[in-house]
Image (tube, rainbow, N blue to C red):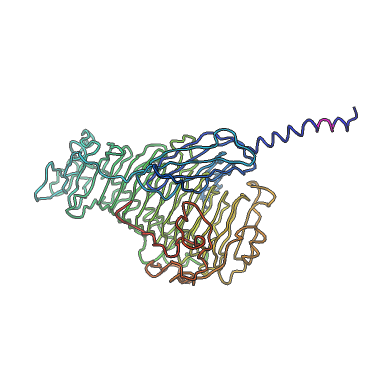
Amino acid sequence: MPKNLLAVAAATVLLPIIAATAEAQNAVTAEAFAVERPTLLSLGFEWRIAGDENRNAAVAVSYRKKGESDWRTGLPMLRMNGERVTGYAPGPSRYGERATSIYDFTAPNMFAGSVLNLEPDTEYETRFVLSDPDGVSGNAEQTATVRTRKTPAPAAGGKVYHVYPSGYKGATQEPAFFSLMAAYYTGADHSDHSIAYPQRVQPGDTILLHAGVYKDDSRNYSGFDPNAAAYGTPFDGTYFLTGSGTPDKPIVIKAAGDGEVIFDGNGNFNLFNLMAANYHYFEGITVRNTEVAFLLGWKSIAGASGFSLVRSRAEDVGRVVQDEWAGSKDFYIANNVFIGRHDPQKLQTWYYQPDIWSKYPGFPAPITSEYAIKVYGQGHVVAHNTVAHWHDGIDFSTYGTPGNDPDQFPSSNDFYNNDITNIADNCIETDGGGHNIRVFNNRCFNSAVGAFSAQPIFGGPVYFYRNLSFSGTAGGPLKLIDTPAGVLIYQNTFIGQGSMAGPVSNVHLRNNLFIGDNWKVPVFTLSTFTNYSTSDYNGFRPNPQVEKNFGWNSPEFSVAREYAKPVVRRPFATLAEYVKAAGQDGHSILLDYDAFTKVTAPDPNDPQRLLDPKDYDFTLVRRSKAIDKGMVLPNITDGFTGRAPDLGAFEYGQPLPHYGPVDGP
């Protein structure tokens, strides 16, 4: 047979095989489905798959309260596969050669996503349907019945112990103690015997702290000085608490209600150490004069679960809550006020920007208060706190590449309704998060470097939705660096430039307002490794005197993603040019400050000025261009008025969120 006929014959045989192989790779196979730890208001889910090389599979989500007949629609799950996270420590190394990458992560072939805006302690039925035009094999539908977490609270029926400050002379309630350690354990001592006492408290017990200042003289060995306090924390002044409660019966340490309870660390490093303790509930206390108020975990060493801190205050501390242990779960930090040591009259930062911060006295700002809260792990809730005058406000730990143990993968954490101001770096950092990190309904005023950070995210999704950011600086609302993957930015009001650094992978923006604040920087520039990143239905106010106000930097449009080559930079002068060339934001609009009831641009010549939220009203005016210009985002825009959802964090005519402490969850 001639060679050309042999080739034709071979092709006749091979082409159906090749086509069948390609079809098999594009078809999707359902694999393991997982339910993450619930929080009070959210549920997270993961679904591993195989195939779907052309990325056209989808997972539709629906949910309902158990007992209801009608299903509600949720946001579809986020598709991920092969996105890479490889980041470096920022800045040059003082030791010479730059360090190699500190992250090495590739997103698996899977979907992940959340059901949002639920009610605490409520059982929900959830349904997930996998579809693919190329075919589905395996179980294409998954269901799960999951109860949201209830708000932590003291249990009834446990023993009650009363604690009074040293030197107290009034009437006491029995059993009475003059040291927290003496009530928690069977005794307290200021000598070598300080750790010898067995534990007294049991799950469900309550220690009531009566009014006064608890300030230990930790160097008073054996407590022989009758005029000095001796609370049983010799030398280091730390309350080491090592017992454990249960989710339903925490060990409770709370103010008795007869006046302010103050724990003064007397300048020590750490006041409360709970790295070997689970399910402790603190309420109504003030902590001051220490570097770390509550130490809950160290990476690869030990850590706590079930820690609650509610209706309390911290001031003159370096860190309030510190946890960097992958096994930590179910924290509840809510309705607190945390005041840092940074200058309360003006903003200053560590970050060098020529002709901006370095010309002001106090640069670089020393980190006298590093952060109010840092957590890591699963199932944490950080909500309704006031945080002011810190380097960082609220952080997820920049832990490094997550391990393979699903019980320690950073997932399912909520940060909402926090009121944060005067921050030298970032208001909320999701850095180091994995799947289903949710940041919503927060207000960030006066952040120097960026309001909301994803540095990085390991697969995602991280949700930023219905947040408000306003600063008089060039820092902007978003910091997407160290190659984060899986970022959803929905329904936010951002006053400030949107040059978000990057590149970021698999990022999607909808229904946001990016309002330029007169700094000479583009109002919107996104750098992404993935050409399946998307942006649409947003509102922009370009910055005057900027030639190129828009940018979309990505690989050549002929490839889905590219990590080996630099992104192609594409700056544009106008929204129309950007839409035409990049194929993004085709439904987006231009608008100005007159879209709001009472908002004016900050003065770029005075970035240190602290803007006061009481001076502004970010609700939309009746004829705002932002009204009815959004798209439906199930579970986020539910209950919108008019023909379509409005742009930005606030739907016209609906009540505003409450930022900072309240009584509820």
Residue 581 in which image quadrant:
bottom right
Any magenta on residue 485?
no
What secondary structure is the stretch in magenta mostly built from?
Answer: helix
Residue 144, placed above or below residue 271: above
Q: Residue at x 40, y 38 (%)?
A: 327
Tell me which corner region of the image, top left, top right, bottom left or bottom right, holds residue 540: bottom right
Can you name the residue that lies furthest to the front here?
69
Q: Position of residue 152 (x, y in %)?
A: 30, 45
464 left or right of 659?
Answer: right
Residues shaded magenta = 7-11
Measured as percent of width and height from the top left, residue 502 is found at: 56, 53
Residue nearest the observer in this picture, 605 or 636: 636
Residue 84: give x, y in percent of width and height: 58, 44
Q: Is residue 10 visible?
A: yes
Q: Is residue 8 magenta?
A: yes
In the image, 288 versus 433, the foreground residue is 433
Left or right: where 240 falls relative to 445: left
Residue at figure coordinates x 27%, y 39% from the top left: 249
Residue extending farthest to the top is 1
Q: Nearer the viewer, residue 290 or 15?
A: 15
Q: Which image quadrant: the N terminus?
A: top right
User: Where is 358 relative to 436, above or below?
Assistant: below
Q: Position of residue 133 (x, y in %)?
A: 63, 42
Q: How many marks?
A: 0
The reply to whether residue 100 is in sight is no
Question: In the orientation shown, which residue stands out farthest toward the right?
Answer: 2
